[in-house]
Image (cartoon, grey):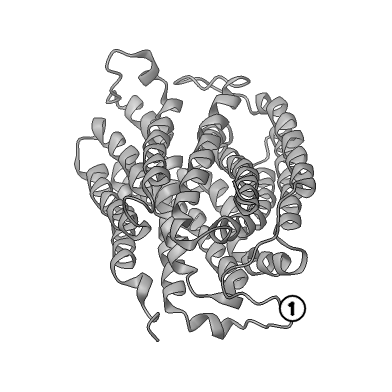
Amino acid sequence: MSNTGKTNLVAISIVGILFLAIGFAFGINPILIPHLKNALHISDTESYLLLTATFLPFILFGIPAGACIKKIGYKKTMALSFLFFAVGLYLFIPAAKIVSFPLFLVGSFISGTGNTFLQASVNPYITICGPIESATQRMAIMGVLNKAGWAIAPMFLAIFINTAAGAKVNLSEMISPFYIIVCLFIGLGIFSYFSPLPEVKAEGESDSKETKVSEGSLVQYPHLILGLIALFFYVGVETIALATPVDFAKSLEKSGLLQTFGIEWFANTANYVTFTVLCMWAGYIIGAVAIPKVFTQNTALKACAGIGVVASLGAVLVPPSYAIFMVALMGLGNSLLWGPIWALAMQHLGNYTKKGGALLTMAIVGGALIPLLFGACKDLFGDIQKAYWICFPMYLFIVYYAFIGYKTGLKK
């Protein structure tokens, strides 16, 4: 193996650990939402504010995160992000002690700020640390690790909290696991800072520190702007597919429609997010093995966007007992959207790579606004299944980007 190959392998391994941590941090929310709703007697819309607080920093601090990367580099920015994570997650401890929803929101906002800086560094890094044609392959590997973190989070919390169907959880039970989580994220920050992670530059990116990038200059890349919109919709529908199955299963359980198939595992509503994660893993593994040798990342984008269209319709139209499995199918559709959109949107940016990456990171705010809209629709219709209608037009736009939007303005 060449020195370059060894360097890339080390970089991918280190960043992979960080993607696992991102997934773990996000995976906590689906468990907290129903428990906070019951403990604090709040509405569905209010409970989904927890997701909003987690994702809102992406739009507030996306550009500052890009400036931070330009100033101190990718590695130090990654280390800094875990400081924010540790502070934010630590606030969950006093919030649980005094049962304070506002303090939960503050903690979520600060940890979300850490996530903003981390995402703004790891996503461009993994995109440009190798050939752009195989960026989706690297992203697929990161996706497997990221969703492993989503799956580990509820299993970890289950050690301390009874997540069985119908169980009543006292928020004070969450204190012990969050002490462990805070220590873990402090350790990851130290690991990031001292890791042998090399700095990388995109093709065409100048070494000059005097290069200035204006907001207007980015508008000259319509494929980037359309990619921003596509990512905004993607993160929203992915968050819905991962954050709502437990809530959906609980509603089916209350109405007597939950299908257990005579298997106890299906009776635990906390397990239903696993179906979505497994479907995403299947897509990631296919992408990691087949891209770019068997099919291109653009082909993967087209196919997965189409699956998303079909699955989002099925989540609304099929009988409720089985619609929850269509939400899991949305996970398969989501699996190979993130990587191709990032890779296609960041083509030919040159000196605008860091600014473009920061701009795309801001699209993650879709994970705040779209689930909040989902919660509002659920309250409005009084039926969680009907709320999945909002996913359909978002997948349609991603289909447009897969066929037309990604090449808009490139000839010019």
Which residue lies at the image location 24% right of the left edge and 32% below the top edge? 322
* Pointer 1 residue: 209
From the viewer's perspective, is 13 left or right of 274?
right
To which quarter of the image does residue 191 belong? top right
From the viewer's perspective, is 64 left or right of 152?
right
User: Is residue 220 visible in this depiction of the protein?
Assistant: yes
Report how many numbered discs are placed on residues in the image.
1
In the rendered image, the residue lying farthest to the left is 318
Label 1's element?
loop
Which residue lies at the image location 51% right of the left edge and 55% below the top edge? 368
Q: Nearer the viewer, residue 186 or 377?
A: 186
Q: How crowded is mark 1: few (under 14 residues within 10 Å), some or many (20 or more)?
A: few
Residue 263 at x, y percent in the picture = 33, 14
Residue 324 at x, y percent in the picture = 31, 35
- The image shows residue 297, relative to residue 66, as above or below, that is above
Q: Which of 367 and 206 is in front in this view?
A: 206
To which quarter of the image does residue 229 belong? bottom left
- The image shows residue 339, relative to residue 160, as above or below, that is below
Residue 270 at x, y percent in the picture = 46, 27
Q: Which of 109 and 227 is in front in this view?
A: 227
Q: Which amino acid does label 1 sit on?
A: Lys
User: Is residue 37 visible in this depiction of the protein?
Assistant: no
Q: Which of 379 and 58 is in front in this view?
A: 58
Point out the image quarter for the C terminus: bottom left
Which residue lies at the image location 38% right of the left edge and 32% below the top edge? 275
- The image shows residue 90, relative to residue 168, as above or below, that is below
